[in-house]
């Protein structure tokens, strides 16, 4: 939906299973009109569309894209952002680290993203000139050699694909007037995980070697080439991922802004937050109670990384929830908190024995009120299929409840002033 001052709010359709185009079309036909009627019956309702590579290829066949655009207009829906992170399957089978494959070292990832840009340019309404595509944080960190010398070809390969995409996005804007940017999404164990790692990648790789490539291809100065890269390559701030890394939105946004890096989209999402009892901190869950309390969250589809904050402020990282439980600290070790990469409903401050990182959403929206750093907001709780039973409701009711909560906590300048497209 279109809020005041050209701010758009949607939810991501990655919550609906389906990899082929017909499955995607069917889920949109099921949920789109109902959600529009319940949430903004008098106005167009925005969709954050997730397309696998298979669905994207199928959508570009024949007249499907034109037919889909017509169906969106007929139903009062519009698409302004795409989720281009998962290339392949994302539901009802083991995904884990393969959500990053193929990564940004490969031509397949570049081709997929260009395909999504072509689709988005064809779907953006006439009066919506900006579109966003969120994507993976380049790769899965354990897949790359940790030494700088050995990893150099991998960084160069990522940059080469992002340069290809940048050139395609520049051409798209020149041809259609539609401004579309691709936004890297830092997440736990991603090659880009924190604001500092994002800034280092831009400084040491994208704006160095990448600017040289853009300058040579387009006949631009180095300064102009850097500006082109910063226009079309940005960051997707996922509030769940940021909170798991114990970063604050003020610092995250500030670090990126200091380098001129755009935040193209905010994904509104929440993680599990578990205070642990220990010396000097009696409130919290006892370490020995964690296995039983977390049993409902032990599922095999997605990675659920855990980052542990210790009494001295240091962080201990675990690849997945089973690894964290297997490595439980012995009695007396100064673990003070766990944050678990398990998306829980954004309206939920408490998840039974646990809390959530909901406050980080509120803090991000507060920073947004002070410094309008993005035009796109997307609610992204994709775990409805695997949530514990006490957090599950009817899916449409759950989506409506997430929208209702989000609009209630949005800064007043946006929340109460919906405008028609």
Image (spheres, rainbow, N blue to C red):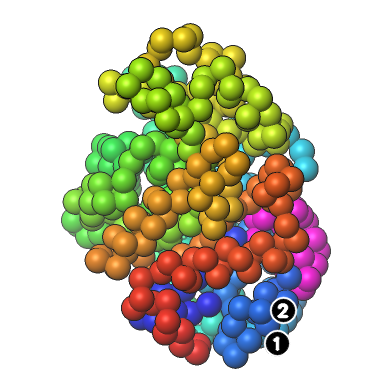
Q: Residue sitting at 40 percent across and 44 percent down? A: 242
| Among the 4 quarters of the image, the one containing residue 317 | top left
Relative to 210, is 266 above or below? below
Looking at the image, the residue that sits furthest to the front is: 282
Q: CA distance from mark 1 to mark 2?
A: 10 Å
**Label of residue 74 in the image:** 1
- Asked if disc 1 and disc 2 are in contact, CB closer than 8 Å, the reply is no
Query: Which of the pair 280/372 is nearer the observer?
Result: 280
Q: Nearer the viewer, mark 1 or mark 2?
A: 2
In this orientation, does residue 96 appear?
A: no
Q: Residue sitting at 40 percent across and 65 percent down? A: 170
Predominant secondary structure in magenta? helix
Relative to 258, is 196 above or below? above
Q: Is residue 26 magenta?
A: yes
Q: Which residue is mark 2?
A: 33
Q: Is residue 314 magenta?
A: no
Number of marks: 2
Q: Residue sitting at 66 percent across and 25 percent down? A: 292
Q: Which residues are magenta?
A: 13-30
Q: Position of residue 375 (x, y in %)?
A: 39, 69
- Element assignment for label 2: helix
Q: Residue sitting at 44 percent across and 19 percent down? A: 145
């Amino acid at each position: 939906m279109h809020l005041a001052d050209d701010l758009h709010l949607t939810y991501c359709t990655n919550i609906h299973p389906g990899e082929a185009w017909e499955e995607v079309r069917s889920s949109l036909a099921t949920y789109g009109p109902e959600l529009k009627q319940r949430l903004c019956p008098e106005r167009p309702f925005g969709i954050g569309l997730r397309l696998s590579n298979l669905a994207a290829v199928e959508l570009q066949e024949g007249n499907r894209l034109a037919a889909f655009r017509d169906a969106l207009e007929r139903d009062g829906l519009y698409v302004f952002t795409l989720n281009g992170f998962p290339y392949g399957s994302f539901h009802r089978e083991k995904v884990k680290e393969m959500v990053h494959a193929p990564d940004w070292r490969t031509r397949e990832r570049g081709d997929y993203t260009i395909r999504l840009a072509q689709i988005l340019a064809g779907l953006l309404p006439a009066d919506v000139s900006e579109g966003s595509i969120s994507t993976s944080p380049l790769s899965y960190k354990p897949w790359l050699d940790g030494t700088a010398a050995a990893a150099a070809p991998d960084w160069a390969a990522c940059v080469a694909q992002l340069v290809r995409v940048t050139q395609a996005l520049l051409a798209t804007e020149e041809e259609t007037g539609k401004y579309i940017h691709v936004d890297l999404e830092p997440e736990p164990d991603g090659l880009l995980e924190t604001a500092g790692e994002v800034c280092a990648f831009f400084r040491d790789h994208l704006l160095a070697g990448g600017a040289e490539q853009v300058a040579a291809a387009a006949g631009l100065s180095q300064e102009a080439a850097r500006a082109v890269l910063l226009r079309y390559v940005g960051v997707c701030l996922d509030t769940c991922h940021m909170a798991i890394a114990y970063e604050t939105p003020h610092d995250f946004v500030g670090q990126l802004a200091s380098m001129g890096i755009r935040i193209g989209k905010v994904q509104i999402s929440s993680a599990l937050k578990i205070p642990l009892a220990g010396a000097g901190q009696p409130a919290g869950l006892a370490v020995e109670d964690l296995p039983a309390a977390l049993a409902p969250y032990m599922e095999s589809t997605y990675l659920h990384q855990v980052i542990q904050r210790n009494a001295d402020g240091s962080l201990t990282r675990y690849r997945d929830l089973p690894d964290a439980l297997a490595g439980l600290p012995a009695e007396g070790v100064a673990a003070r908190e766990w944050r678990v990469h398990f998306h829980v409903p954004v309206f939920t401050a408490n998840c039974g024995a646990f809390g959530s990182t909901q406050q980080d959403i509120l803090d991000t929206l507060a920073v947004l009120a002070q410094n309008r750093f993005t035009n796109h907001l997307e609610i992204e709780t994709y775990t409805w299929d695997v949530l514990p039973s006490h957090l599950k409701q009817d899916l449409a009711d759950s989506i409506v409840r997430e929208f209702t909560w989000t609009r209630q906590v949005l800064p007043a300048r946006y929340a109460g002033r919906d405008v028609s497209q």
